[in-house]
Image: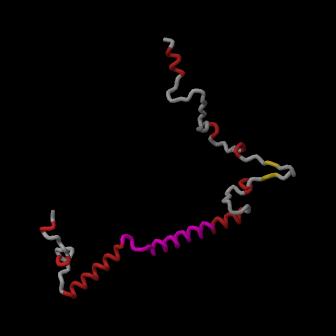
Amino acid sequence: MRILPVWSRVRLGSVPGARFVSQTPSPGAAGSAAVSGLSPVEHSDDHGHVEVSVYEKNRDFHGFHKDPQVDVWNMKVAFFFGISVAIVIGGTFVHYLPDHGMRQWARREAERLIKEREAKGIAVLDGNYYDPSKIILPSAGDEE
C-alpha cells in the first residue's frame, strides 16, 4: 500500500523539475489595469541624456516618423499608394499576360482553316489526319 502515495504525486505528461505557472488571471485581478511592469526602463548614457522609447510618446507608432501626426499621415499615404500600385499595376500585368495555353490562337486558326476548306469545297473534317498520297510506305519485300 506504499505505492498509493507515490502515484498521487505523479502527473502523466509532466516534466520533472519544471514548474508550470497558470497564465489565467486570478478573479481578483479582473478589473486591474496596472501594467507598470511592462513599460520599458529609460536608459541614460554618459552625458545624462535619457533615451525615451518612441512607444512611450506615441502608443500608435507605425515606424514612419517620430512625430505622431506625421507618422499617421505617412502611414496612410504609404498604404494608399502601396495598395493602389499593387492593384493597378498587378491588374494591368494580369490583363496583358499572353494567351495561356494558346487557346485563343487555336480557335482563330481553326476558324481560318474552316473558312479555307469551305471556300475550296473540301470536307471540313477528314477521316485521314495525313494526306495518304504523301505517305511513303515500304514495299512488302523490304520487310525482314
Residue that protrudes farthest toward the bottom in the picture: 119
Quarter holding the C terminus is: bottom left
Question: As rendered, which of 54 and 47 lies closer to the eye?
Answer: 47
Q: Position of residue 26 (x, y in %)?
A: 61, 36
Q: Considering the whole magenta stretch, tell me its main secondary structure.
A: helix
Residue 111, image x, y percentages: 28, 81
The reply, left or right, for residue 41 in relation to residue 93 is right
The residue sitting at 67% across, 57% down in the picture is 60
Question: Which residues fall within the magenta stretch?
Answer: 78-101
- Determine the image quadrant of residue 21: top right
Q: Residue 103 in the image: x percent, y percent?
A: 34, 73
Q: Looking at the image, how many numbered discs can be counted on the residues?
A: 0
Name the residue located 19 percent from the left edge and 75 percent from the top edge: 135
- Vertical placement of 56 versus 10: above or below? below
Q: Residue at x 53, y 29 (%)?
A: 14
Q: Position of residue 131 (x, y in %)?
A: 19, 77
